[in-house]
Amino acid sequence: MKVPVKVGEPVVMASKFDKSFLRQDFQYPNGSVEDFYLFDYKKGESPAIAIGVTEDKHIIGVRQFRHAGNIVVIEAPGGVLKNPSEQPEEAIMREFPEETGYTPETIIRLSPVPIWFEPANCTVPYWSLLALNCRKEHEQNLDDTEIMETVIAPLETWISWIFDGTIRDSKTIATTFLALPHLGIQLAP
């Protein structure tokens, strides 16, 4: 398949903290050149998110305000890897306790490669992980811009929230789906 090719360097339209909004030209096989607008993180700093599970199979998530949707969503907690050498598991061991107050005993990487948020307009994928045997050790330790609270629900309730639209965050839905076999729920082929 012939695919478009990047033309020139991306133009930064706006930037704040570690995120940028870019304009990038692409030349198509028919010779036309079109510009696309892309969301970008600093290179090598993909986010890692984790579905947390207590010993009695309750799911730990967060209820958080999200600016783009201007809504509060229930989602899996996580954060950005601090540098290209940091592993997703390390990021979750730092971020999960900060955002929830729970510390995981074990972390399982659910995919051998990162998963794309939206490959049409976001240059950065994310890592999906499962945090097992999480124990409450302290209160949340949130950054000034994090508006969230911890949510705990039985696994069955969490899954029902996906099907009834209570959980609408696609990365949380995908990570839950990938975690199910590790939680004793076998998926039919």
Image: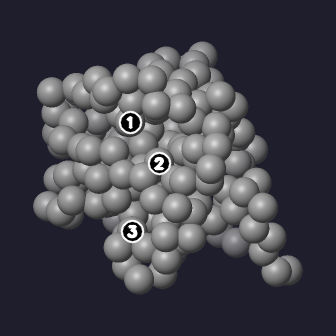
SS for dot 2: strand
Answer with the quarter of the image where residue 116 lies: bottom right
Mark 3 → mark 2, Cα distance in angstroms: 13 Å
In the rendered image, the vertical position of residue 56 relative to residue 106, given as above or below:
below
Taking the spot 42% from the left edge, 52% from the top edge, the residue there is: 152
- Residue 27 marker: none
Mark 3 → mark 1, Cα distance in angstroms: 17 Å
In the rendered image, the vertical position of residue 27 relative to residue 109, given as above or below:
below
SS for dot 1: helix
Q: Is residue 4 visible?
A: no
Residue 182, percent across and down? 76, 54
Whether label 2 touches label 1, CB < 8 Å: yes
Taking the spot 70% from the left edge, 72% from the top edge, the residue there is: 1
Residue 17, percent across and down? 23, 27
Mark 2 → mark 1, Cα distance in angstroms: 8 Å
Taking the spot 72% from the left edge, 57% from the top edge, the residue there is: 183
Taking the spot 49% from the left edge, 66% from the top edge, the residue there is: 158
- Say whether residue 183 is left or right of residue 129: right
Whether label 3 touches label 1, CB < 8 Å: no
Which residue is the site of mark 1? 100
Which residue is the site of mark 3? 167
SS for dot 3: loop
In the rendered image, the vertical position of residue 184 relative to residue 157, given as above or below:
above
Amino acid on which the number 1 mark rests in the picture? Thr
Which residue is the site of mark 2? 60
In the foreground, 147 or 119: 147
In the foreground, 97 or 71: 97
Q: Earlier in the sequence, mark 2 or mark 1?
A: 2
Amino acid on which the number 3 mark rests in the picture? Ile
Residue 33, percent across and down? 38, 64
Among all residues in the image, which is located at the extreme right?
189
Residue 45, percent across and down? 47, 29
